[in-house]
Amino acid sequence: MNTQPEKNNPGTALSVKGDGEPKTPKQAAPKVKPAPPAKPEKVDPGNQDLALMQRIAARNVKGNWLAFFGILPADAAIVLSQADLTGFKIKGARLSDADLSGATLIAVELSEANLIRCNLSKSDLTKANLSRAQLIKARLTGADLTKANLQGADLTGADLSGADLTRANLKGCDLTGVKLDGAILLAADLTGALRNGLDLSSADTTAAILN
């Protein structure tokens, strides 16, 4: 008789606890991927510029506690005379009856804005985008509109006496009853513009496109 102890099969060996029960093999904890960092919320620069413009206008409102904290009251007149709004993106802004006389508005984005009866006299609107803007009865006397984009804008009854519209884009805009006494329209493009009652006799239309 063979009295040698039987050898355990190494492939089926189990470790034994101190109380004689087999140990359960430990399983590795699942790896949890860290959450990706939250992307910063995109802020429309136009909203920032509009808020800044309103704070600037609020400085000119006297005797109102909202204005004291930089908030423009809803019923307050918008006075931005001599303000520097260069490069502001305020598309569609509501500025009817606002005072922007002498303001610096170089390359400002004012497309589709409401500028009805707005005072823009002697303002600098060089390369400004005023396409499809409402400029009905606006005052633009002596304004600099060199290379400004006024395509599709409504300028009915506006006063542009003495304004500089050199190389301005006036395609398809409404110039009904516009005053252009002494205005400069050097190389301006008036293709398709409505010119009912428009008097260009005292304006400089050298090289202007008047089709």
Image: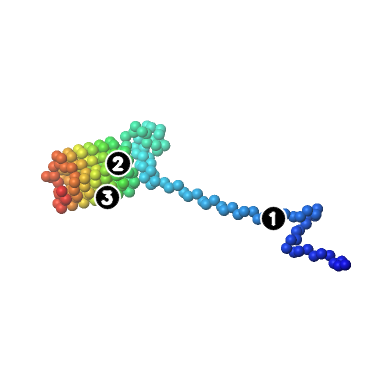
Distance from label 2 to label 3 (Cα)? Answer: 16 Å
- Asked if residue 52 lies left or right of residue 128, the reply is right
Asked whether, in this view, residue 78 is left or right of residue 204, the answer is right
Q: Residue 127 carries which label?
A: 3
Inter-mark Cα distance, 1 to 3: 72 Å
Q: In this image, 191 relative to 39: left or right? A: left
How crowded pointer 2 is (Cα within 10 Å; few <14, some 14-19, many 20+) is rated as many
Amino acid carrying label 1: it is Lys
> Dot 2 corresponds to which residue?
113
Left or right: where 62 falls relative to 158: right
Q: Report x, y in % for residue 24.
A: 72, 54
Amino acid found under the numbered disc labelled 3: Lys
Screen quadrant of the N terminus: bottom right
Is residue 117 at all visible to an observer of this figure?
A: yes
Circles 2 and 3, Cβ within 8 Å, touching? The answer is no
Determine contact: label 2, label 1, CB under 8 Å: no
Residue at the image point whose x is 37% and y is 32% from the top: 63
SS class of the residue under badge 1?
loop
1 or 3: mark nearer the eye: 1
Q: Which residue is identified by label 1?
A: 26
Q: Quadrant of residue 25?
A: bottom right
Regarding mark 3 in the picture, which secondary structure is present there? loop
Quadrant in which residue 73 is drawn = top left
Mark 3 or mark 2, which is nearer the start of the sequence?
2
Type of amino acid under label 2: Ala
The answer to whether 5 is drawn above or below residue 92 in the figure is below
Q: Residue at x 26, y 43 (%)?
A: 132
Label 2 – label 1 distance at C-alpha:
70 Å
What crowding class fits label 1: few (fewer than 14 Cα within 10 Å), some (14-19), or many (20 or more)? few
x%, y% of residue 112? 29, 42
Which element carries disc 2, helix, strand or loop?
Answer: loop
User: Dot 3, crowdedness within 10 Å: few (<14), some or many (≥20)?
Assistant: many
